[in-house]
Amino acid sequence: MLALIEESWLIAAIGLAGGVLLGLAARLGRFCTLGMIEDAHYGNDRARLWMWALALGVAILGNFTAEAVGLIRLGDTIYLRNDYSLIGAALGGLLFGYGMAHAGNCGYGMLARLGGGDLRAMVIAIVMGIAAYVTLSGPLAALRARLFPIDPNPVMEQGWAHLIEAALGIPAGIMAGLIGLGLAGAAALALIRAKRLTEIFWACVAGFAITSGFVGTALVAANGFEPWAVQSHTFTASVGDTIRYTMFSSGLEPDFAIGSVLGVVIGAFLGTLIRDGFRWEACDDPRELKRQMGGAVLMGVGAVLAAGCSVGQGLGALSLLSFHAPIVAGMIWLGGWLGLRHLIEGVSLVRQA
């Protein structure tokens, strides 16, 4: 395969394929982080929470099975080979979650809405991508690096399963397999009881897409000639990467992030055609757009501090059983709940007064 196609295009194709699956899952399976939090707190519906748990279980099983058969060394992934700041993880997750609620969706959800014709989502995604780059390598980069340093050479893999293996001798794959089977089994059973079989399928698709990113990039990195990062889907700085590539593609190479972003848009577009037909939408309320753009800035900054978004950390890093992922995921949930509470209950209190 590497003899037939340049490594950069192959990496981008791997991202594109997984992105299409995630885009379809968003439009046809209603796979959504903010929707999950809103349903759980205000809709008395746990279906999307069980979907997320099932996708996570499938990704855990896929990742550690791939390691067991020699397709990947999970310690080479960006989430396990770097020691991130715990304070940055907590603060970044909180900012991201709160911004997600005010923006109306996470980066992944924005791309899915863009694929359905929502022009507001395009504006919000661009603002989010620029804010991420301002924090990652722009004017705020030096301050971020000083306040929230990252150790790129920790003494061991930054994951719970690998820590238990080192301390107790229990193979990481066995510990992860038990966790993955438990999550997937409990979630699938709950969805079966609720007669939500479609959600089971799309949750499995989402989990497979996460594993495909890690395994695909690992295989190219191991067999190619360039030092590719072993990574999977995340949708904040990746949007900034796509904007940069769109402007300067003659001097840049495509990569996984760009393929992933385009894949979600394409998958969501196809899903929209299948589900209810494509149609353009625009913003008719400037105040709402201003609030959403402010939320996008918080998401961009927060995701860089947390080293990932609701998908990058909430599925990708968490499916590796990373040390920091539970903190980020929990704070994203908390921030999302606080943001929704402000928007929903805050508005109602003003009207009552």
Image (cartoon, helix red, strand yellow):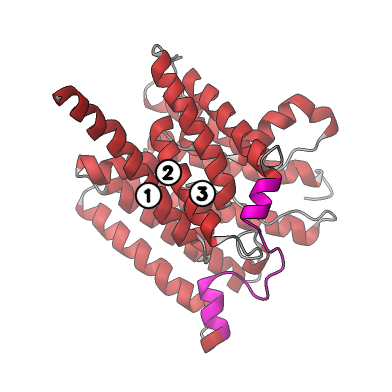
Disc 3 crowd rating (10 Å Cα; few below 14, some 14-19, many 20+) is: many
Proximity of marks 2 and 1: CB atoms separated by less than 8 Å: yes
Dot 3 or dot 1: first in sequence order is 3
Please tell me in which quadrant of the rendered image residue 278 appears. Answer: top left
How far apart, in angstroms, are the residues tagged by discs 2 and 1?
6 Å
**Is residue 300 on the magenta stretch?**
no
- Numbered disc in front, either 3 or 1: 3
In the rendering, at what x and y percent does residue 258 appear? 67, 37
Question: Is residue 58 in sight in this rendering?
Answer: no
Disc 2 crowd rating (10 Å Cα; few below 14, some 14-19, many 20+) is: many
Q: Residue at image x 84%, y 28%? A: 250
Q: Residue at image x 45%, y 72%? A: 177
Secondary structure category for the residue under label 1: helix
Checking the image for residue 92, the label placed there is 3
**Is residue 161 on the magenta stretch?**
yes
Q: Amino acid at mark 1?
A: Trp
Checking the image for residue 333, the label placed there is 1
Q: Classify residue 20 as left or right of residue 251.
A: left
Checking the image for residue 325, the label placed there is none
How far apart, in angstroms, are the residues tagged by discs 3 and 1?
12 Å
Task: Please state the extent of the stretch shown in magenta in the rendering.
Answer: 142-166
Q: Residue at image x 80%, y 50%? A: 2
In the rendering, at what x and y percent does residue 328 appear? 47, 55
How far apart, in angstroms, are the residues tagged by discs 3 and 2?
9 Å
Q: Amino acid at mark 2?
A: Gly
Disc 1 crowd rating (10 Å Cα; few below 14, some 14-19, many 20+) is: many
Q: Residue at image x 52%, y 62%? A: 324
Please tell me in which quadrant of the rendered image residue 27 appears. Answer: top left
Determine which residue is flagged by label 2: 97
Dot 2 or dot 1: first in sequence order is 2
